[in-house]
Structures are given as structure tokens and as C-alpha cells.
Image (cartoon, rainbow, N blue to C red):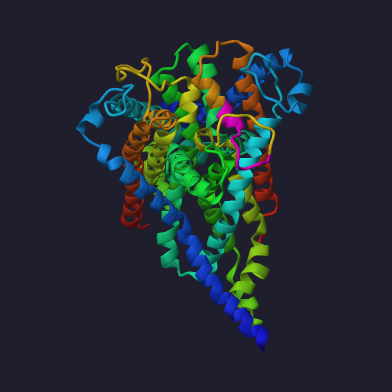
Amino acid sequence: MNRVILNRRKDKVFSVVGLIATFTGLILLMFFIADILIDGLTRLDWNFLTGLPSRRPEKAGIFTAMMGTVWILILTAVISFPVGVGAGVYLEEYGKKGWLSRLLEINISNLAGVPSIIYGLLGLEIFARILNMGPSVLAGSMTLSLLILPVIIVSTRESIKAVPQSIKDASYAMGASKWQTIWYQVLPASLGGILTGVILALSRAVGEAAPLIVVGALAYVPFAPKSPMDDFSVLPIQIFNWISRPQHGFIINAAAAIIILLIITFMMNGIAMYLRNRWQKKISW
Amino acid sequence: MKKKKSEHIIEFLLFLSAFVTILTTVGIILVLTVEAYKFFKEVSIFEFLTSTEWTPLFTKKNFGILPLLTGTLLTSFIAIAFALPLGLTIAIYLSEYTPKKFRDYIKPSLELLAAVPTVVYGFFALVVVTPFLQRLIPGMSGFNSLSAGIVMGIMIIPIISSLSEDALRAVPYSLREASYGMGSTRLQTAFRVTLPAASSGVVVSVILAISRAIGETMIVAIAAGQQPRFTFNPLVPIETLTAYIVQVSLGDVPRNSLEYRTIFAAGITLFVFTFILNNISHYIKTKYREKYE
């Protein structure tokens, strides 16, 4: 009988251990964020947001890095959205059989596991050098687009898969062509899921530093980019640069810039989750 | 009825979009092999694989990848040693102990851990974790693989917990009921029935986590140091494959020089490792998926 009691006790203990484990990561993250807020909040003011880079920490601002991030975000969205959704539609609606689609599928799951820095090497050699774009916003955006393409493709396929066959059949029965069915029925019905995936992928792109550093993005850029061919920096690179400096003032700056970066990331994640929930509720087949 | 011409054009355009992914893979492999080939024309593969010193940026140059490799393996090992017990406990707890409602709230929150940009984690490792650990372990260096590894572990918890939990929940309920019927507790059921039944899924989650840790860049570039060192001591500065690529990219290394090509040699080493790991996980996923019902 003793063993039974012991086993029951172990079971109880695990239910506590499990609860603690579940919240360990989250509590650590909250602790970290609290630390960042304490370090960085005092530094956050209008001058910091609109200031140009500087040697002196108390004068330095994030304006050029933030504009670089905005440029990268918009260009990456413009490039990756049509290509990613197009590829997803093709795989789900057109190329469903044969060795080619199987190859595409294996290939995409492989690409999803390639480290981001390898994409940086690809972008450096192909976009920056061979296509002669240099370390420009365009080269950076194209690199990041390739990086997030697998995520967009996978989420597009999942959302399209959720559209029931009956809707398509009805559309065909009315004489619609395949593309008309996709354009007028399938895509509108799955738009919520697709957008959720795209926004999550873009929020990942916004936080990336490594591939852009490899492509040649600079830590110090005196002016905000004005065209896709200009040099640029982004917030994560600016943060990395400040962290690597010895003066304490730059650590404070890094913390303040992290607050801005986290606001952007969490906001995008929030929008994605909101969209997901809304769409799930709205559509009931 | 014959398809209209525009339908064909659209199908072709969609195919092109999908084909971009093939081009990406071909591009990656070509770029890495061409540059690495040029590198190995000047440096012997034997030296690359066996020398324990990596000093391509010094006047006395050595091209042994081993220090970068041990650095990468060391930080990844620490990350997994931290994330595996936690992630697995979370997965078992969520799938076997908690109601669906709790799970629905907690899972997206855990995913948030993976959504935080990695420079931010690097900051935590350098500014928060290292000073804290230095108080516990005197003599620990300001750059070290221990705090970088731990923070990386926090980041990859959701990979293990989320994928393992999916695998655990895919185990049919009848198996658990049979176990409960024999008088087992939830804990006994979890470890003797559910976990073994879901083992392939759990292994896949761990392999993906390892692959992620090996390729992680900013955390180790910020907190683990930039000193290639052939050691498994977690308290001293080291350098990983990824951090080396970042270090060279930030500096003024002339294009088409041997130093420049070293980042592709490091890159192809990294790529080979993650490629093998990803394919093992893919293989296990398709081959060993237990079929119930």
C-alpha cells in the first residue's frame, strides 16, 4: 500500500513542478523586460527617437535605424507577400501530385531549417555582389524575403486547406474557372489565416540582425535611406552595436532601443493573434 | 472546354513563385560550395579539419575549424541541457495535467518566448545573466558560453514544449485509459505509456531545437565572445561558427581575399550540420510516425 501512496504523492509533486516549469520561461522573460524598462525608460524621449547616431551616448538617437527598419519592413512585405502566397496557392491548388511538388515540399521544409545567417551569405554573394546592389535596403529586403518565404508558404497552405471543398464545387458549378474560384472564393475566405502568417513572418524579419550584417548593412549610417538603393541600418543592428561598446551610456541606449523594438514585435504579434481569433469566429462553415 | 490563355499564364506565374524556393536552395548550395572551393584551393582540408587553432585574421594564420565547432557545440549543448528538461516537463504537464482552456491560453504565451528578437536575448545574457552568474561563480569571464547557452535555452523552450506537446496529444486517449484502468497515476502513465508512444515526435522536437541552437547567431555573438578556443570550459570566452561570420562581416576584410572566403568555409560547415539534422528529423517524422486507430 505504501507504494501506492508514494506514487500518488509523486503525481501531486509533478503537477506542481509542471506548473512551475511552465511559468519559468515566462517569469524570466518578464524579469528581463522589467530590467530593460528600468534601464531604458528614462532615456526614451523625443530626441532619442529623432536623433541621429553619435559618438556620445547622451546625444545618439535611433532615427536612421528606425527608418531603416521601416524601409526593410515595407519592402520585405511587398516582395514576400505575392511570392509567398503565390507559391502557397500553387502547391495547394495546382501542383498536388508528381515528383516536382514532392521536391518542392521537401525543399521548403528544409529551407525553414536553414540558419538565418546562411541566407545572409546568399544575399551577400548574389544580391549585393553579383546583381551589384551593394549593401542596400533592396538587397537586405530580398534576403529577408527569402528567409521568411517558407513561413508564409506554409501558413498560406494551411489557411487554404481549411476552405471546404463544397465552396469550390459551388463556384465551379456556376461556371467559374479555376483561377476565378481561387480569386473570388478561396483567397477571400482564407485571407485571415494568410495575413496572420505573413505578419508573424514579418515580425521575425524585423527582429533579424545577423543576415543583414552579413549582407553588409552598416552599424553607422548618418542619414535615413531615401531610396531602395541606399545604405541602411536597422534597429537590431543599432542595438547590437551599442551593446558591444564599453561605455555604460550606450548600454542604456541599447535598453531604450530594445523597448522600441519589443513594442514593434509584440504589436505585430498581437495584431496577428487578433486577426486569427477574429477570423476563426467569423467563419463557420 | 479548353482553358483560357490567361489561366495558363496565371498558373505559370504561381509556379514561378514556388520555383523561387528551389532557386534559393540551389543558390545557397552554389554560393557556399564555390567560395568554399576557392578557400580549399589555398588551405588543405586536412588542416581545416584537424588543426585546433583558428586565427585567419592574425599574421600567423591557422585554419582549423575545430575551435569554432567546439564553441558552437558547447553553447548548443548548454542550451539543450537547459531547455530539454524544462520543455519536456511543460509538454507533459500541459498535455496530461491541464484542461484545454488553460492550454489555449498558455501555449501562445510560450510562443512569445520565441518571438523576442535574438539581439534582445543577447542583451539579457550579457547585461543580466552574466553579472548574476559571476556572483555565484567567481572567476567567470565577462564573455562566456554558459550565460549565452542558458539564454538560448530559454529561447528554444517553446520549440521543444510545443512540438512535444503536439506529439503527446496525438497519442490516442484509449492508451491512457487502459493505463489508468490498471491503477496507474497520471505521472506513471505519462512516462511509461504516453511518452514512449510519442517518442518519435519528441525526438524530432529536440533535433529541431538543436538545429536552431547551432544556427543561432546574435546571442552568442554578443555574450559568448569572439575568441576561437579549443575548449569545453563554459566559463571562458569562445567563438561560434555564426559569431565568426558576424565578426568578419563587421570588419573591413577585402573582398576576394582568403580571409573573406573563411566565412563561407564556416558557413558551409554550419550548413552541413543543420542540413543533416533537419533531414534526420524529417526522416524520423515520416518513417516512425506511429499509426493508431
In front: A82, or A234? Answer: A234
Direction from residue A79 to residue B180 in the image, left or right: right
In the image, which residues are magenta?
B232-244
**Residue B199 vertical placement versus B272 (above, below):** below
* Residue B115 in sight here: yes
How far across and down, in percent of the image, does residue B86 sit? 55, 58
Direction from residue B195 to residue A265 in the image, left or right: left
In front: A91, or B249? Answer: B249
Corner quadrant of residue B200: bottom right
Corner quadrant of residue B278: top right
Tell me what residue is drawn at x 42 percent, y 33 percent.
A243
Instruction: Assign the magenta stretch its main secondary structure.
Output: loop
Quadrant, the C terminus of chain B: bottom right
In front: A51, or B41? Answer: A51
How far across and down, in percent of the image, does residue A65 sit? 33, 26
Direction from residue B160 to residue A206 in the image, left or right: left
How far across and down, in percent of the image, does residue B263 sit? 60, 22
Q: Is residue B165 magenta?
A: no
**Residue B282 vertical placement versus A133 (above, below):** below
**Residue A55 vertical placement versus A92 (above, below):** above
Tell me what residue is drawn at x 58 percent, y 27 percent.
B244
Tell me what residue is drawn at x 45 percent, y 60 percent.
A23
Residue at the extreme right: B46
In front: A190, or B240? Answer: B240
Tell me what residue is drawn at x 50 percent, y 44 percent.
B130
* Residue B19 in sight here: no
How far across and down, in percent of the image, does residue A244 sit? 45, 30
Q: Is residue B233 magenta?
A: yes
